[in-house]
Image (tube, rainbow, N blue to C red):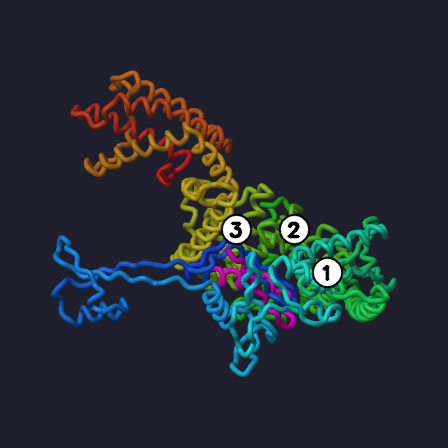
């Protein structure tokens, strides 16, 4: 079986596109080969800045002959029907076969497609792949207007086996395939031929090209670490930058340079961001002081002066960049120390969203939310409001204007410079978190408070203007905001009511006195004077039902996704939502306990017993037109198993009620699971729908008690299986 080697050699491919391009090349070629009948043993894609390479092992020498049998019209059918069938099959009438079937004689056609040589199929598939390659961005070049990311220079395409290598003949836009390639642009110019992937890889290495991006990245990281260690320093890890730099060079040469002393007092985040964004440099840190003191750059060639000229040029450019950063830093510090509030006032002229007002108006809402949420998080209300008003001040600073990714980080420095407490300053950086499923969650009460307020304002605001996520589209990152709220509550073990939080977020966008009326109504309910929403107008109730509860449902959906990744089944969450609709923390604790119970044999069998009881009871209630909830009487129990079930239900209820009150859900679930044996024995020995009406009603009421006891823990009707 021959091996296939393809190389598409071009001008420099942007680093961010290389990995995806390699995977696209592999998928399109291998899918095309398989579709044409050519199977293979394995395939691997490799990339450098100037080439996309695909190696396919164990390819069939030719596609197999395919025999296909097609059923045609009946014998004696109209000539037009038969002629149409013949055209589709590519046969003549004398090549058809008549066969008897239960419905009469029918024409059958046997179509044989002979196999094709691998070279013909590869040429066809590769040509189509090149012409239709899915580059995110491409340029039109050549007389035919073909698109490629950068001008394509050559196509290497060979099939090799023990007998030797064969060029797969093909041509795209005047470029003919061959068996030659080039090495490093400067260190090994000129073309050379190859006979196999092993020969190709070895000759490229001798021509100063490391073919594997993983090998280039490993080489860069190891050399950088060794240089830093020798100087008593450490390289700041940045996997994204490492992957990008590995895509910029074919022969990585690692160099370490100095940062001028005048810039060493800049915040390390400023130095790191400036060097990464503008120069693609790695930061080198002093582990004792935390200062960034040097940088690592990666050249694409070896030089006679061991990189001295390259380093000198890089240091000159870096000094100019850092001089700008120092200017921004010093200007911002002067403002922060004299009147940091002017930055917040400047946000009155910055639009957050055309339907949601300015950034300053948003800050007012977040501050109001933070004050309301402070009792939930244990934060001081006044401090929470102050922190919320300062948290986004740095959006007006010169440094954040130049480096938007430093928002929050610079705010912490500036708020501390303004003389505020460190916990207030930390809010500026922390309140954006968590930004993703693996991001750290703030734990300081002030930071948690403002982070919740920020995300709730975003969610309630966009729900208010009906800008919800649809399908895969989520331009305002509302799913991420909802996940952030979930993680903030769970990982800080907050006793938080979702409906309450959504309501106060809604309040900030709508009626000034809405929260006061909700509070009054809830207080009246506690006293037994009225319903919790009695003080709302019909319009407000309608808005709550259509928007606030819709957002609550969205939270539930995001919670299901979050807990599914933690190993908790969706049906378990649904079963618990019926019992804990608004208290997120209790809902999750209940779901975890139920998930653990139904994973046991007792729990699984109890669910089946419950469903059997519920089905019998539901059918009887529909048939009889009554609800069996009056309570069963043990004096009508006839069998020992029936009497045992009465006792077991009473014992379980006696354990479940105090466990639920104490929020000890594992204990409540365990008590429920203990019913498995008595329920099984009951159904084994007792006929519920007996001819004796008194016994039947009593047993149906006993089933109702099973439903009542189990449903006090979770809605087991939602459990699948």
For the point 50% across and 49% down, which residue is it? 500
Specify the quadrant of the image occupied by residue 281.
Answer: bottom right
Q: Earlier in the sequence, mark 3 or mark 1?
A: 1
Q: Is residue 588 magenta?
A: no
- Distance between the alpha carbons at the discs numbered 3 and 1: 29 Å
Would residue 403 be visible to someone looking at this image?
A: yes
Graded by Cα atoms within 10 Å as few (under 14), some (14 to 19) or many (20 or more), the crowding at tag 3 reads: many
Graded by Cα atoms within 10 Å as few (under 14), some (14 to 19) or many (20 or more), the crowding at tag 1 reads: many
Numbered range of the magenta stretch: 1-30
Whether residue 617 sits left or right of residue 650 in the image: it is left
Secondary structure beneath label 3: helix
Secondary structure beneath label 1: helix
Secondary structure beneath label 2: helix
The residue singled out by tag 1 in the image is 410
Q: Which mark is residue 501?
A: 3
- Distance between the alpha carbons at the discs numbered 2 and 3: 16 Å
């Amino acid at each position: 079986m021959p091996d296939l080697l393809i190389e598409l050699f071009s001008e420099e491919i942007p680093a961010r596109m290389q990995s995806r391009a390699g995977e696209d090349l592999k998928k399109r070629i291998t899918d095309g080969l398989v579709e044409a009948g050519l199977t293979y043993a394995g395939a691997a894609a490799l990339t450098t800045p100037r080439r996309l390479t695909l190696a396919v092992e164990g390819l069939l020498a030719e596609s197999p002959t395919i025999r296909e049998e097609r059923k045609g019209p009946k014998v004696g059918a109209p000539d037009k029907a038969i002629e149409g069938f013949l055209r589709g099959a590519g046969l003549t009438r004398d090549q058809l076969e008549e066969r008897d079937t239960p419905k009469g004689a029918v024409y059958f056609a046997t179509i044989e497609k002979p196999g094709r040589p691998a070279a013909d199929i590869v040429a066809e598939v590769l040509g189509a792949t090149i012409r239709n390659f899915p580059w995110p961005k491409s340029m039109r070049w050549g007389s035919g207007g073909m698109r490629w990311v950068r001008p394509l220079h050559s196509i290497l395409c060979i099939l090799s086996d023990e007998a030797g290598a064969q060029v797969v003949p093909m041509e795209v836009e005047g470029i003919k395939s061959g068996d030659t390639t080039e090495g490093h642009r400067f260190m090994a110019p000129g073309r050379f031929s190859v006979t196999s992937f092993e020969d190709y890889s070895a000759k490229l290495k001798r021509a100063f090209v490391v073919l594997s991006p993983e090998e280039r990245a490993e080489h860069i990281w190891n050399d950088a670490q060794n240089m830093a260690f020798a100087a008593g320093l450490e390289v700041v890890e940045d996997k994204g930058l490492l992957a990008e730099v590995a895509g910029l060079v074919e022969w990585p040469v690692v160099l370490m340079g100095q940062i001028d002393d005048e810039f060493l007092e800049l915040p390390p985040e400023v130095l790191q961001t400036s060097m990464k964004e503008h120069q693609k440099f790695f930061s080198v840190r002093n582990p004792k002081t935390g200062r960034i003191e040097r940088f690592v750059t990666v050249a694409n060639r070896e030089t006679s002066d061991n990189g001295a000229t390259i380093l000198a040029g890089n240091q000159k450019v870096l000094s100019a960049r850092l001089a700008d950063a120092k200017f921004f830093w010093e200007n911002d510090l002067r403002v922060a120390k004299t009147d940091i509030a002017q930055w917040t006032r400047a946000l009155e002229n910055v639009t957050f969203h055309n339907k949601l007002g300015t950034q300053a108006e948003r800050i007012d809402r977040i501050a109001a939310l933070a004050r309301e949420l402070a009792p939930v998080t244990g934060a001081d209300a006044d401090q929470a409001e102050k922190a919320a008003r300062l948290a986004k001040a740095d959006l007006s600073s010169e440094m954040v204007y130049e480096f938007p990714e430093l928002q929050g980080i610079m705010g912490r420095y500036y708020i501390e410079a303004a003389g505020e407490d460190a916990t207030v300053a930390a809010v500026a950086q922390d309140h954006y978190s968590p930004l993703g499923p693996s991001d750290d969650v703030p734990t300081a009460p002030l930071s948690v408070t403002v982070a919740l307020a920020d995300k709730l304002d975003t969610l309630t605001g966009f729900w208010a203007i009906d800008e919800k996520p649809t399908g895969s589209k989520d331009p305002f990152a509302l799913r991420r905001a909802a996940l952030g709220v979930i993680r903030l509550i769970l990982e800080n073990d907050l006793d938080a009511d979702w409906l309450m939080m959504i309501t106060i977020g809604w309040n900030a966008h709508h009626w000034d006195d809405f929260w006061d009326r909700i509070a009054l109504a809830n207080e009246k309910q506690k006293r037994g004077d009225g319903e919790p929403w009695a003080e709302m107008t019909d319009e407000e109730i309608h808005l709550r039902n259509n928007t606030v509860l819709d957002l609550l449902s969205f939270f539930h959906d995001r919670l299901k996704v979050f807990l599914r990744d933690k190993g908790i089944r969706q049906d378990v969450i649904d079963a618990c939502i019926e019992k804990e609709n608004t208290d997120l923390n209790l809902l999750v604790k209940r779901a975890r306990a139920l998930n653990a119970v139904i994973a046991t044999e007792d729990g699984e069998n109890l669910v089946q017993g419950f469903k059997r009881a519920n089905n019998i009871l539901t059918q009887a209630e529909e048939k009889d037109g009554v609800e069996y909830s009056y309570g069963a009487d043990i004096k009508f129990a006839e069998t020992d198993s029936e009497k045992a079930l009465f006792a077991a239900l009473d014992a379980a209820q006696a354990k479940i009620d105090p466990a639920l009150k104490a929020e000890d859900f594992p204990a409540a679930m365990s008590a429920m699971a203990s019913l498995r044996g008595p329920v099984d024995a009951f159904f084994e020995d007792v006929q519920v729908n007996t001819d004796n009406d008194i016994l039947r009603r009593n047993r149906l009421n006993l089933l109702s008690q099973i439903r009542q006891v189990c449903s006090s823990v979770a809605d087991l009707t939602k459990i699948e299986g």
